[in-house]
Image: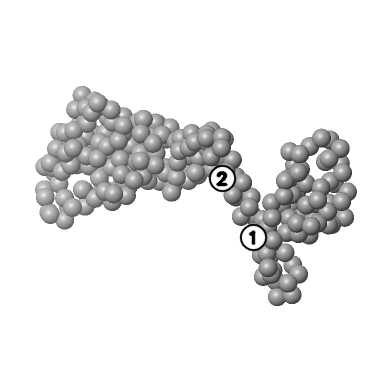
Amino acid sequence: MVICISKSGNTPEIKVLVPLIRSGGNKLIGIVCDVSSYLARQSDFVLNTTVEKEACPNNLAPTSSTAAQMAMGDALAVCLLEFKGFTDEDFAKFHPGGALGKRLYLRVSDIFMNNPKPEVHAGDSLGVIIMEISSKRLGATAVVDNGKLVGIITDGDLRRMLEKGDNALQVKAIDIMTRNPKSIPPNMMAVEALQLMKSNNITQLVVSEDNCYLGFIHLHDLLKEGII
C-alpha cells in the first residue's frame, strides 16, 4: 500500500510515479487537495485535504494545505494505533531511545546502580559524615545499621546543624539524621521517582527494598536520561 501526498495531484512526478505504483499491484491512497485531479482519479482511496485558501499572501505556496495534510497523517496514525490496539508498552518497545519511551520503560533499577553508595553508621562523627557526602557527590548519605536503612543525612541537614551552633565535635550521625526518609523500591518506574522528588521538593531518593539500603537515585540522573 502506497500513500501519495500532493496538493494539486497533477504534477509531472505524480503522473510518472502513479503508473509504476499501479503496475506493481499496490493499493494507492491519495492525500490530495483537488479531488478531480489525476492522483485522485487513479487512487483506490482518496483523502480530501482541500483548503479554501493558502496562508501564503499570494495564495500560491502550499501552507494551509500542508498543515491539513499533516493533520490527516496524524489522524491516520491515531486510527491505526486504536485499530491495532497499540499500547504504552508497544510504544516503549519500538521507541526506546526517546524521552517518551524512557518514561514508559526505564526503572529505578536501571539507573541507581551506576551511582556511588554513600553510607554511615549512627555513631559516626561529623567528620566521617562530611567526608562520605563529599566523596560520593550525591548531596546526602544513608545512615544504616546492619544493612538496614535507619535514616538519611543531607548537606542541608549539615548546614542547619551548623546554624544552630551545635558542638560539632560531639555531633553523631544519629543526632542529625532524618528518620524514615523518603525512599523508593528498585522496581518502580523512573518517572515515579521524579514525581516523588517533585512532590517532596527533594533532589535525591534512597533506593531500598524491605528496608534494606541499596543506593541513591538523584534528580541529575533523570535529567541525564531525558526523563525531565
Query: The residue tagged with tag 2: helix, strand or loop?
Result: helix
Picture quarter containing residue 2? top right
Residue 96 shows in the view:
no
Picture quarter containing residue 147? top left
51 shown above or below 168: below
> Residue 88 location, x and y as percent?
48, 37
Which color scheme did the rendering employ for the protein?
one colour
Residue type of the residue flagged with mark 1: Ala
Q: Which residue is drawn at 64% across and 50% down?
A: 73
Determine the CA span between mark 2 and mark 1: 17 Å
Residue on which the image places disc 2? 78
Q: Which residue is drawn at 21% across and 48% down?
A: 157
Residue type of the residue flagged with mark 2: Val
Mark 2 or mark 1: which comes first in sequence?
Answer: 1
Residue 67: mark in rendering: 1
Picture quarter containing residue 68? bottom right
Q: How crowded is mark 2: few (under 14 residues within 10 Å), some or many (20 or more)?
A: few
170 shown above or below 55: above
Query: The residue tagged with tag 1: helix, strand or loop?
Result: helix
> Residue 153 location, x and y as percent?
22, 42
Residue in front for this viewpoint, 106 or 138 = 106
